[in-house]
Amino acid sequence: MICPSCHSPNSRSGFICSDSAVRQFITSYYNKDHLFESECLRTTVYTCANCGCHFHNPFPSEKILSELYSNTICSRKSYERYFSRKKTRNHLFSILLNIIAFYLGSFSKQKPFLLDYGCGWGQSLDYARVSGFSLYGLEISPSKSLYLHGKGYPVFSSVDEIPLGILSAYPSLILLQQVLEHLPDPSQHIRAISNHISPGSIIYITVPPYKHSQLNARAIFSKGALQPIEHLINYSRRSMNHLASHNGLQMISLSSLVRYPPSYPNSISYFPVYAFLSIYSLFRPGTYFFYKQ
Ligand SMILES: [Zn+2]
């Protein structure tokens, strides 16, 4: 089976999710019992021998994914869940955005652009609002998109809708948080982003942490890192590296990039920033930084 991350044909099959087990999972999780009646939902979990990622095969059809993200996931519940979580403000992420805005700001006198790819209800856009970015979101859910338009955020439904020149003028920051594991063709999305952005841009990607031991029924049907219908691929560090390098991006440690930013006047301001960036990823498994060459 072809690996969706590195395109190697060498993979081995493992756990089989039967049609009835997937239906039971959908019924219990989404509280819907009549979905996708005409489709076979059976999948097999494969492990790529080249990059180590785990993936389902076959992926759900376009019809299923469209139904899932437009109707099945309840907008009201999703909205309530978002606002209950929002009380816990993510201070470390805010600090990170400030540092990256400062770094990217050294390339131009204009505000650096930030594109939140799969921006959801806009939590990261809210954080970034005070960090000095010009903000853009990309979201396919009509209800979330409508909500964000109401808050004044420019939100697009695909990369191709973004006016040419916005992201290519000078280095910008692209966020993909908990997005790639949902996409059947991750290369297509990474390539589209890479083609639009200026060299020097930073791409911040988070995915569910890689769990090599999670290939059993209990883990796969518990809404974890790899699950039928939604979490189609569980990426290893090596698979993320493959995915990026084949699309013109280089995996970096963020601290190496901003080690000597031009505007840090002395070591007193430089060392706390360097220390923060060095330890940030250690406490965020499944977080990766890429640089557009
Ligand atoms: Zn692979």
Image (cartoon, helix red, strand yellow):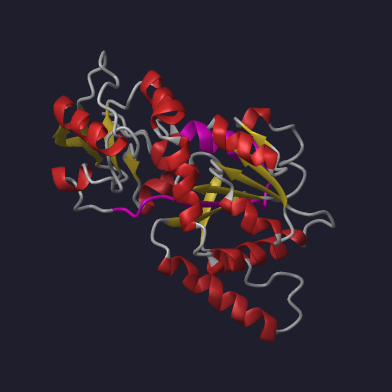
On screen, 248 above or below 95? above
Q: Judge whether residue 10 can be spotted in this image.
A: no
* The N terminus, quarter of image: top left
Give the residues drawn in magenta, as a range. 187-210
Q: Is residue 172 above or below residue 2?
A: below
Q: Is residue 29 at least partly visible in the picture?
A: yes
Image location of residue 171, percent across then percent down: 71, 51
The location of residue 226, given as percent across then percent down, is 28, 43
Q: Is residue 121 left or right of residue 153?
A: left
Question: In the displayed structure, would residue 214 be above or below residue 230?
Answer: below
Q: Report how many numbered discs are placed on residues in the image.
A: 0
Q: Residue at x 68, y 50 (%)?
A: 172
- Depth check: 38 or 104 in front? 38
Q: Quadrant of ligand 1?
A: top left
Q: Tell whether 167 sits left or right of 3.
A: right
Q: Residue at x 54, y 78 (%)?
A: 275
Q: Is residue 203 magenta?
A: yes
Estimate the x, y position of residue 236 in percent, counting from the top left.
34, 50
Query: Residue 50, located in which quarter of the rendered image?
Result: top left
User: Residue 248 location in percent, x, y?
Assistant: 56, 42
What residue appears at the point 76 percent right and 80 percent down from the top-left corner? 265
